[in-house]
Amino acid sequence: MKSILARTLSRKQIVTNDGKAIGTLRNLMVDFETGLITDLVLEPDLSFDTTGYTLDGDRMLIPFEAVRDIKDFIVVDRYLARM
């Protein structure tokens, strides 16, 4: 994946690889020892069933390894996004 500035990710929509809207990116979790992004923190859409996903209060966490593409949307593999 090419380099992307974090400020361009702010409030991007997150969708599954089959086109289902998951939610809106709110923050990133970073491992400060390695500098790698570990998780996307998002506000899930009200219509999205969060069963099987990692939740932290009203936010949902998706492992960064599930990200497949970042352009107009952040596309994640729906099977890798579940914990």
Image (cartoon, helix red, strand yellow):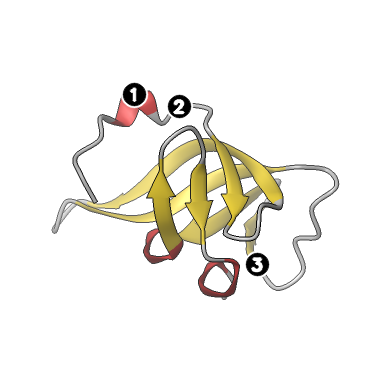
In the rendered image, residue 61, in percent from the top left (x then y), is placed at 54, 56
Disc 1 versus disc 3: distance between alpha carbons? Answer: 25 Å
Q: Nearer the viewer, residue 19 or 81?
A: 19
In the rendered image, residue 20, in percent from the top left (x then y), is placed at 71, 52
The residue carrying mark 2 is 10
Looking at the image, residue 45 lies above or below residue 79: above
**Left or right: 41 as drawn, with respect to 7:** right
In the rendered image, residue 32, in percent from the top left (x then y), is placed at 19, 51
Q: Nearer the viewer, residue 15 or 56?
A: 15
Residue at 51% across, 73% down:
80
Residue at 65% across, 67% down:
53
Look at label 3 and name its amino acid: Tyr
Tag 2's secondary structure?
Answer: loop
Residue extending farthest left: 34
Crowd tier of the residue under label 1, counting other residues whose Cα lies within 10 Å: few below 14, some 14–19, many 20 or above = few
Look at label 2 and name its amino acid: Ser
Q: Quadrant of residue 45?
A: top right
Looking at the image, residue 45 lies above or below residue 8: below
Look at label 1 and name its amino acid: Arg
Task: Assess whether mark 2 and mark 1 are in contact (beta carbons under 8 angstroms).
Answer: yes
Tag 1's secondary structure?
Answer: helix
The residue carrying mark 3 is 53
Disc 2 versus disc 3: distance between alpha carbons? Answer: 21 Å
Residue at 31% across, 31% down:
6
In the rendered image, residue 76, in percent from the top left (x then y), is placed at 51, 58
- If the image is split into quadrants, where does the C terminus sit? bottom right
* First in residue order: circle 2 vs circle 3: 2
Tag 3's secondary structure?
Answer: loop
Residue extending farthest right: 47
* First in residue order: circle 1 vs circle 3: 1
The residue carrying mark 1 is 7
Crowd tier of the residue under label 3, counting other residues whose Cα lies within 10 Å: few below 14, some 14–19, many 20 or above = some
